[in-house]
Image (cartoon, grey):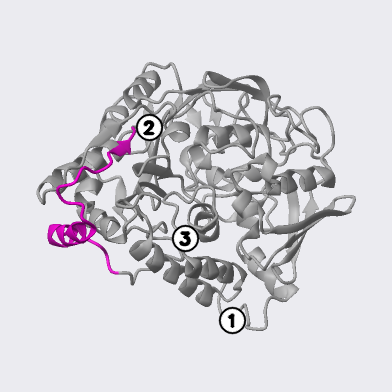
Amino acid sequence: MNDDEIKNGGFSRRDMMRVMAAGSMLATGAGGLLGGARSAFGAPAPKKGGKIRVAYDAGSTADTMDPAKGSAGCDYIRFFMFYSGLTQLDASLTPQMNIAEALDTTDAKTWVIKLRKGVTFHDGKALAPADVVYSLSRHKNPATASKVKSLADQFVDVKATGPNEVTLTLASANADLPVILATPQFVIVKDGTTDFNAGIGTGPYKVKTFKPGVSTVGVRNDSYWKPGMPYLDQIELIGISDNAARVNALLSGDVHLINSVDPRSTQRIASTPGYAVLETKSGLYTDLIMRRDNPLVGNPDFVNGMKYLFDREQIRTAVFRGYAVIGNDQPIPPGHRYFNASLPQRKVDLDKAKFYFQKAGAIGTTLPPIYATPDANGSVEIAELMQQTGAKIGMNITVNRVPADGYWSNHWMKHPLGFGSVNPRSSADVLFTQFFKSDAAWNESGWNNPKFDQLLLAARSETDDAKRKQMYGDMQVIVSEQGGIGIPSFISLIDASDKRLQGFGSIPSGAMMGFSFAEHVWWNA
């Protein structure tokens, strides 16, 4: 979008349709998001058959098939295996139509969703508007305890307006709606579903078995609405939290695809015949959380001191072996179209750190320990580097390393100092709404900034892209300077696979093709 396309008078329907068409948002994509790219490079044509095992780096008894409850990448993989979203993201993070055939709007506030015909649930029921109304509306109900309630709160009205049509009215205009609807939690379930363990959806695979914390097995849905897809007979998803064990499982042939490869393991995998490493530059970040509800840690001077302890270049090279870019304590990565390049880069500065710690009364006192876990990429190493750097100025930093299993339910956001790990989000609005809005469930530091909240709502409604970019730029300044988190780097996603697994590529919204590998890959034995 540019100033010539979107006038101050607002969106006309013609403007919106032209902008959406230019971004390929109205492409049906029935052949698969990456289908054209595959044939262009002369790759072998996809073939049907084969079974694979996939090891993800997380898995616990909290594993879920309820889209509203999902908060881990392994949950998102399940959602995209068994359910379908109205839209889905391609390799450029452009939203493509999925089980929605079109999204039509004149003002970016009222959206008419046309549903694709011929889509059926795994039990044979045809997709209907009531399913979409139920699926989107349940996230608004506080009793659902949806992880995306902060996003769904902008859905003021969702109603069926025709045999194949749903009208979604937002609280205020949001040009990002097609992107938001590709969020994993917004996949479509059957109207009235309360027990999700059967995973009855319209997705490419059907549930064979689901054992939380053990494994998930899906078998091909022969009635999938995309012609010829999916390709595999069966996919089994298991959790292996330990990197070395995950790599060993791949190289021994026990599994065929893994995520979250430790950069130190990449050379070993790449040098083993028959195996490949895939790097995807992304907005993934591991962040230091400093809770505002603790009088010492929540002190803005303490927060500033901690941000000046990050040796960002050392973190990039030593912790992530170069598979990262330097961050600046705000969540929009370099390369994102709304990245604020004019924000001065904060660098390690022990004099400034000491100044701020002294102001906060933190030197010589007993500090709460930093909770770190292997499941927040690099957090243990980052905490240990901060411990060493802090010791040079009299800071007594201790590190509590806790296992990956149970970290997110037992420790994340529950200690004064800890680490988070935030998967890439396709839109600045989604990222800021889920993690930085004052009332967001995942507002990690518990900060509250009315000016930020106002800018977030204003940016959402702004259809002039240059003005929108300025607003997001201002929000990055506020988070970097005043937020209660530190982001030292943005981490590349590193997956690795058996080379016989074909069709695997990059979708930067998350590991394993933005968690949607299941419908794209095939086995070329």
What is the CA distance from the residue labelled 3 to the residue labelled 1? 36 Å
Q: Which residue is mark 3?
A: 448
Left or right: 509 with respect to 32? left
Q: The residue tagged with tag 2: helix, strand or loop? A: strand
Q: The residue tagged with tag 3: helix, strand or loop? A: loop
Q: Which residue is mark 2?
A: 276
- Residue located at (31% from left, 28% from top): 269
Mark 2 and mark 3 in contact (Cβ < 8 Å)? no
Return the x and y of residue 488 as percentages of the image width and height: 29, 52
Q: Which residue is mark 1?
A: 4
- Residue 522, located in which quarter of the rendered image? top right
Mark 1 and mark 2 in contact (Cβ < 8 Å)? no
* Among numbered discs 3 and 1, the one appearing first in the sequence: 1
Q: Residues within 10 Å of mark 3 (few under 14, many from 20)?
A: some
- Residue located at (44% from left, 57% from top): 447
Q: Which residues are magenta?
A: 344-373
What is the CA distance from the residue labelled 2 to the residue labelled 1? 44 Å
* Among numbered discs 2 and 1, the one appearing first in the sequence: 1
Mark 1 and mark 3 in contact (Cβ < 8 Å)? no
Q: How many marks?
A: 3
* Among numbered discs 3 and 2, the one appearing first in the sequence: 2
Q: Nearer the viewer, residue 385 or 369?
A: 369
- Residue located at (56% from left, 43% from top): 39
Left or right: 176 with respect to 508? right
Return the x and y of residue 295 as percentages of the image width and height: 33, 52
* Extreme residue toward the left, this view: 392
Q: Amino acid at mark 1?
A: Asp
Q: The residue tagged with tag 1: helix, strand or loop? A: loop
Return the x and y of residue 6 as percentages of the image width and height: 62, 78
What is the CA distance from the residue labelled 3 to the residue labelled 2? 44 Å
